[in-house]
Each structure stands twice: as C-alpha cells, then as structure tokens.
Amino acid sequence: MRRSPSGRKTIRLRKGGDFKQNGPRPELDLPASLGDAAARKLTVRLDWYPKIGALVGSGNGTVTAVRDTGELEARHLAFVDLDAVYFELVRHKEERGWHNLTLSREKMVELLENPDWYELTIPSEDLEFAPGSLGRRVRIWQEIATALLKAYCKKYYDTRRAEFESAFLQYEELTDDDPNFLKEYRFGVEASKEEYVRKLRDLKATIESGQLESLTLWGALDIFSFDQHLYRPLVHLRNKDVAVKPVALNEGEQQFVRDLKRYHEAHPEVFESRELYLLRNLSRGKGIGFFEAGNFYPDFILWLLDGDRQYVTFIDPKGITRLRGVEDPKIEFKNTIKEIEDRLAAPDVTLHSFIISNTPYDEIEYWGMSKKDLEYRHVLFQKEDEDTYVETMLERILDHG
C-alpha cells in the first residue's frame, strides 16, 4: 500500500549525467592538477600498524601503539618493481569498472616521487635497510606503494566523477513511478517448510486486503507499518530462515523507524502545522546515491513539510566503528549536502544529513570527540539517547543546525 508522493522533492541526475557514458576520460594525475580545494580531499591516509600488528607495551599495564610516520623515498623506490605496481593498478582499475580512467606509468612514478598526497603511519624500522631482512622489507615497500596508489586512484576517480555529475544534479518531484517505491517483496523459503509457505500466503492476502497489523512470523520476520512511510509494510529480518528481496531492514534501521513512529505519535503538537514523511532509500540502480560522498546511499529520506518549505533529510542508521573517524565521507556528508543545497539554490528546500549510530559512544571515544562535538556533526546515538535522539534530530533540522 502506498501514500501519494505528490509535492515532495528529491535529488536525481538529469539525462546526460552518466559519467562513464558521457563524461571525460580523465588521466590519473597529481593533486595539484585539480586545484587546492579538491587536492585537500585527495589525501590518502594509510596506517600500516594493523597490517603488521606492531604493538608496544607502555609499561603501566596497558598496551598502546607507537605511531611513527614516514614516506617512500627514492632509495626505497629503487628496489620496488614499478612495472608490477603499474600492472596491478591497471588490473584494479578494470576490476572496479573505471574504464574511462587513463593510467600512465609515468604519472604513477611521478606520484610516488612526490609523497605530499599521502600520510603513512608505519614503524620507522620498516623503512630502514637492515642486513638479512632486505627481501622482506622490499615486499613491504611494494605493498605500500600499491595500496597507496589504489586508494589515491579511487579518490581521484571519485573526485572527477563528482565534479562532472554535480552539474547534472537537480530537484525532481517524487512520483509514483520513482524507482525507490517498492512494488513487491520476494520471500524465499525451503519448499519443505510448508508452514512457512502457508503463512507467507496468508500474509500476502492480508496485505492485499489492507488489514495488515504488525506481526512476527515464526520469529524470523517482523512485519510492521508506519503510516508516515510512503509505502507499507516494512520488513525486518530476524534470522536466515527466510530470504527477502530487496534487503530487509536491519536491527538499527527498524529501530529508527519505530523510534520515529513513537515520537510522531507522542508529539502531535509538533506536527500540528507540519507534515512528516519517510521513505526507505534503496541501493545502487534505484535509490538516491551521492558519488561526492564515496558513492553513499543513505538508508532513509525524510521530508518535513512546514508551510511552503521542505526540509529534505538523508538519514543512515549504522554501526560506526569501521568509519574513518569524523573525516569519513559519510559523516562529512553533513557538509557535502549543504554544498549541494547551495548549488541547486532552491529557496524553499533545505537539505540535511544525519548518521544514527547504533555503536555506543564509549566504543569510539578514541576519535577524540565529545558527544556534543559529534552531535554538531550530525552523529546521534540511538541506544544511549533512545528517548531523545529523534527530537534532537528534528530540532536541528528545523533550526537549520
């Protein structure tokens, strides 16, 4: 069952915006070729400590990592098989489908000889020439050169693609045929599990009759609805007894929808003169993605309509321990989306982005940011602030914060 999407705006690439088909054929080059602003975004950070497990005891009962930094110098590159590095980079490019990117061995060598574009964290001894271990260290230098160039290649390609596609972004009104509107779920179960099959058929009939209530099927599926979501029902997969396409909501995603629903029902005064709508954002090919943020497809799009103004917010509930701190593109998207807003320059549309962390704050304290600092960066904590994070998000949306 769907709600009419009439009037709500979203962001899409207009015709001609496909970088691979219609864009230029960029050649991998030094950061300076793209200007200072883009060059800053191209910095590659490589931490070699996890690779080698070089931990040193601090002497007070704890274990800390000694973090040296360094770079590949001419003396190291003299031992590196640059042809092998180049061919591995070409293979990587083809594997990623970057067919319109040109690589030259000369530019690759020029990059390695000008190390200003990367920050390498590595034990100093691994960059020294030591009798009896030169072979092992040369292999390390070759791995490092390859890893740095692969990471840079991705950043360079993403930057050139974002540069091209940004000119083709536009607001579009959401319509009934938008690819994000789910037409059907496909459930897969073993044929031998006849009870599962029967319950799924009963579920289909219930949905078609419009009488659906929230229910749990044999502990494997949560089927639930939120009236402000633009289609019903939503599916949360509890275990692997059933396969669902498209991908069902994970734990953090379904909890976000339930928390938003609870807040919406408990605070009618907030929505007395406003309308709130939510839509699950599908992944590549159907959903709305942002190449400027590392090909980021946020999980949800939320519309808050306040008079003639639309607040369009992209929301991604997730664990954040694997993100690269506050510089991760998904967190930086809080700023990127405002740059997009400025470019599109629609006076009645305000864009926002939030990360809803289901990772507890104490697990990422090593980022060196207080919870207040992270809130300013639109990272909110789902479990610790269960009763307040939705309200905080909506307040920041309306305050343009």
Image (spheres, helix red, strand yellow):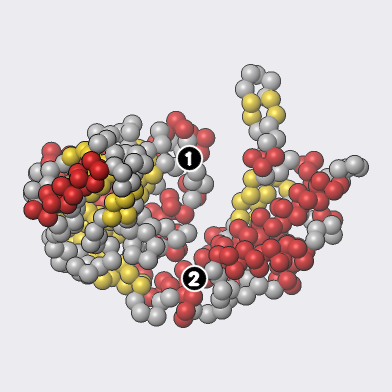
Residue 314 visible in the current orientation: no
On residue 161, the disc is 2
Residue 234 visible in the current orientation: yes
Horizontal side of 247 relative to 201 (left or right) equals: right
On residue 3, the disc is none
Which residue is at 54% across, 69% downward? 97
Helix, strand, or loop for circle 1? Answer: loop
Q: Is residue 310 above or below residue 358?
A: below
* Residues tagged 2 and 1 counted as in contact (Cβ below 8 A): no
Q: Check the picture and name the quadrant holding the N terminus.
A: bottom left
Which residue is at 62% across, 63% downward? 92
**Front residue of 255 and 330:** 255
Which residue is at 55% across, 70% downward? 98
Image spot of residue 231 (x, y percent): 18, 56
Image spot of residue 21 (x, y percent): 47, 79
Which residue is at 52% across, 71% downward? 160
Mark 1 crowd level (few <14, some 14–19, many ≥20, 10 Å Cα): some
Looking at the picture, which amino acid does disc 2 mark?
A: Arg
Helix, strand, or loop for circle 2? Answer: helix
Image spot of residue 12 (x, y percent): 33, 70
Which residue is the site of mark 1?
Answer: 321
Looking at the picture, which amino acid does disc 1 mark?
A: Thr
Q: Of the residues under marks 2 and 1, which one precedes in the sequence?
A: 2
Q: Is residue 396 above or below residue 309?
A: above
Residue extending furthest toward the top: 61
